[in-house]
Amino acid sequence: MEQRRSTLGPGFLWGVSTASYQIEGSITADGRGKSIWDSFCETPGRVKNGDSGEIACDSYRRWPEDIELLRELGVGAYRFSIAWPRVQPSGSGKPNQAGLDYYKRLADAVRAAGIEPWAALYHWDLPQTLEDAGGWPARDTALRFAEYASLCFEALGGSIRNWATFNEPWCSAFLGYGSGEHAPGKRDRAKAYAATHHLLLAHGLALRAFREGDAKGSIGIVINPAKPRPATARAEDQEASERASVERTGLWLEPLFKGAYPEEHLRDHGVRMPIEAGDMALISAPIDYLGVNYYNEDAVQAVQKSAAHPEGFAYVPTWQPKTAMGWDVEPEGLTRILKFMADGWPIKAMYVTENGAAYEDALGADGRIHDAQRIEYYQGHVAAIERAVAAGVPLKGYFAWTLMDNFEWAHGYDKRFGLVAVDRATGKRVKKDSYYYYRDAVAGYRP
């Protein structure tokens, strides 16, 4: 089959993303403190098979192998997260030098391989001591985060030039404190909204620390937006689609870019945000980029407002093929959500910071993993970002999720998103066919 060249051009950034708790392991090594995910995993019934991040991919020790995998892929960037409990074991006070040294070694080695490190300050592993003191529903956690961020900027700013304050704060707020599906496993919607404000406030405080310090480079935030498509062309379903977008999209972008929360959404849920003087100015200070994590798109229809459906919409069945997570494969949804955000908010630069799929991979008799479904998923979504750029979306880069099979939160190790398989007993890395597909995509080829 004839190969065609990408329309994205040589300036487009290709990368791979990971997260600290999902790959590092070594949860008690070198002074690391306990996180809410350590505690969550210890609670029977919270994580499938009783799995935990105790070993994960053992990347805390095997990171040189992982950097070699990245180098062979030819990516221009590696996005990872910094574990707050490694840097500040109790969430405050004097930093743990061993933790800072680990991330400096990692970032410097990534750069030495010709790859730019992109670091997220927070990918869900809150120090347990801060959760014990109230967690994200408590304002003080935002102040502690600003101190932690400042420590990272000062110690690592010479090695890391591209930062994100948070990864998917909606998950931290609504899965952590609303549904209880994620750590710390609380079920209190009022706390989820308080956590939302304090996560955004923490972002604003860290952003101010970055701007006022000597840090160089770019800083942004990563969200997982959604705008479920309307089930029909009827006006009421079109309106339902707009309402269904707010919790995952407008609730974050309105304060970030316009300095206010969406009032109708808060009113529908009977919520009053714990805003204090100056908060919204901090939250809406300019960022350099917005990270966008996308996996799937749902569909909704209008229904009567009720306790079960306070905003008057309900999710409906769809025809799309599903991944192992049960998520629809809908590449056009990526084009749609990027265009929706570019049209609705003054975003000067966007990156797709996570995109990928879990499937039931198996090692073949030839010693290879022929994950054709994942390749098809990536092909569709790479084409989707090409369409988005052609439509004028200020998209500057794309990061695949993820480098290797890892700890998939409450699903344990059952759901595998990696371009590389990891043997659970030995830690051996095995490249899947999708690894080689992505190598071609990074090189600019579109089969």
Image (cartoon, rainbow, N blue to C red):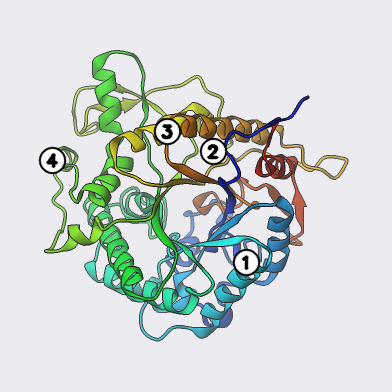
In this picture, residue 69 sits left or right of residue 271: right
Q: Is any atom of residue 36 visible in this view?
A: yes
Residue contact between numbered discs 3 and 1, judged by CB atoms under 8 Å: no
Percent position of residue 294, x then y: 47, 40
Give whichever of 368, 200 is nearer the camera: 200
Q: Secondary structure at mark 2?
A: loop
- Image side of residue 443 versus residue 198, left or right: right
- Which mark identifies residue 311? none
- Residue at coordinates 59% horizontally, 51% vertically from top-left? 15
64 displayed left or right of 383: right
Q: Which mark is residue 325?
A: 2
The mark that comes first in sequence, 3 or 1, is 1
Mark 3 touches mark 4? (CB < 8 Å): no
In space, the residues marked 1 and 4 are separated at their CA atoms by 48 Å
Which residue appears at 18% of the width and 27% of the height?
A: 305
What residue would you read off at disc 4?
267
C-alpha span from label 4 to label 2:
33 Å
